[in-house]
Image (cartoon, rainbow, N blue to C red):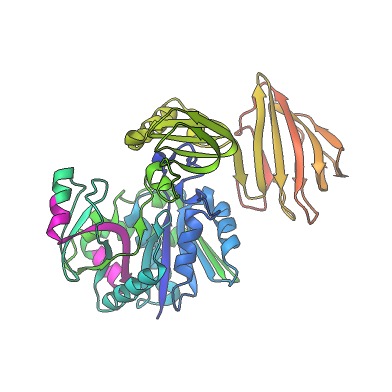
Amino acid sequence: MNMVPVILSGGRGARLWPVSRELHPKPFIRLSDGQSLLQKAFVRAASLPGVAEVVTVTNRDLYFKTADEYAEVNPTGVALGFLLESEGRNTAPAIAAAALAIGERRGEDAVLLVLTADHLIADLPAFTTAVTQAAELAQQGRVVTFGIRPEHPETGYGYIEAQGNDVLRFVEKPDLETAREYVDSGRFLWNSGMFCLTVKTALAELETHAPEVLATARATLAASQQSTGKQRFQIELDPETFATAPDLSIDYALMEKTQRAAVVPCAIGWSDVGSWNAIGDLIEPDVHGNRVDGDAMLHDSENCYVRSHDRLVSAVGVHDLVIVDTPDALLVADKNRVQDVKRIVDRLRADDHDAHRLHRTVHRPWGTYTTLEEGDRFKIKRIVVTPGQSLSLQMHHHRSEHWIVVSGMASIVNGESTISLGPNQSTYIPAGCQHRLSNPGKLPLILIEVQSGEYLGEDDIVRFEDIYGRN
């Protein structure tokens, strides 16, 4: 079957702060088994029978991190496609652009399997069976969604009223009493946010029900830069054109309007992992109902979830708490109020606090940097450059830098000179001096960077050359 999974990877994941940040959103959260939600989504998609290519729609800033995540779990070399957004415009424009791009590559009979990057599915055989049923309906011209058989009344999901495979109606998130009625009736399913349809059907239905979305997607692709390599294609969606796309979900733009809607009822062990309670439920509790991920010691405490991977967290005499510790932020919340974590994120954003955007360790195409300490006119970083990678040739107006190599070998452009440094060797780069750091070796390059100057913001950078295409 000519099936192409399309993984939509976006959003803020504000309810999972402080692990989720704007530049480290929910799909990149690692679970207790070491895999991220994004990696699990990719493995599910790539493991389906007959799948030779997986396409991902994500933010341009997350491309390199996404590619690194896939490289860890793609040993068979499934082909990769990327549609890169400069800003999110909701799911309808993303799916429209993906349908057009895949149609050009695979033809209008290609079956699109639209998946989310941040959900969990525990029963993979049942998932494969549901996908097979959905693909058969899609090839008949239907617009198929996956309806999860509800396990309990849930007010956090939309519902689908169904009769067999026919959709009777979509309904918004209900109150608790209505949710109970839905579950008791046996006619309602949770709306999973996954879809299956052919390229031909997608384009025809968007033309009918959301023509502006489709027109903008066509114009965007026509203006976009495209590149194709071995086992990979990449489309950088033109920012100016894509910014004019209507901000519409595929549910509102198409699913609630189409006459071709169908649903596959299924029980696949699905969870949208939408809160810290849901994350905690993935871990076996101890005899007191506590669930621990990482290093924690609890005494006389019950029904708590604790996550700490960087230091020991202790709790004494507490109950029904969520405690999530990261190097630069700590969350303590009542388990009955975890949905309100996003209120903290809103306040951080309003105050322009870095904790809503970044972790102390920040991923870059060439590796990572970790801010160890900062104060008035100084900042200290730990920089790790992966083998064969290089920072841009750059200059700073307001700060000087002192680099000390800890391990590995560094090749450094410092003004007019190119030097090689090993462990315990250093160099000084004054403000206004062009410089570049590269790792020519086979082991990670680790160094300490000491910045000093009147302004130390990350935007004080002028790039002259960059192998990753950054400005």
Magenta-colored span: 181-207
* Residue 188 is covered by the magenta coloring: yes
* Left or right of 13 in this view: 227: right
Seen from the viewer's position, the closer of residues 26 and 288 is 288
Seen from the viewer's position, the closer of residues 180 and 357 is 180
x%, y% of residue 140? Answer: 25, 79
Seen from the viewer's position, the closer of residues 283 and 156 is 283
x%, y% of residue 194? Answer: 33, 61
Residue located at (43% from left, 61% from top): 7
* Left or right of 124 in this view: 154: left
Task: Name, please, the residue furthest toward the bottom.
Answer: 1
Quadrant of residue 69 within the rendered picture: bottom right
Quadrant of residue 107 within the rendered picture: bottom left
x%, y% of residue 219? Answer: 38, 59
Does residue 432 sit above or below 176 in this rendering? above
Residue 175 visible here: no
Seen from the viewer's position, the closer of residues 201 and 408 is 408
Does residue 391 sit above or below 202 in this rendering? above
Residue located at (72% from left, 24% from top): 452
Residue located at (79% from left, 35% from top): 403
User: In what quadrant of the picture does the C terminus appear?
Assistant: top right
Task: Name, please, the residue furthest toward the top.
Answer: 376
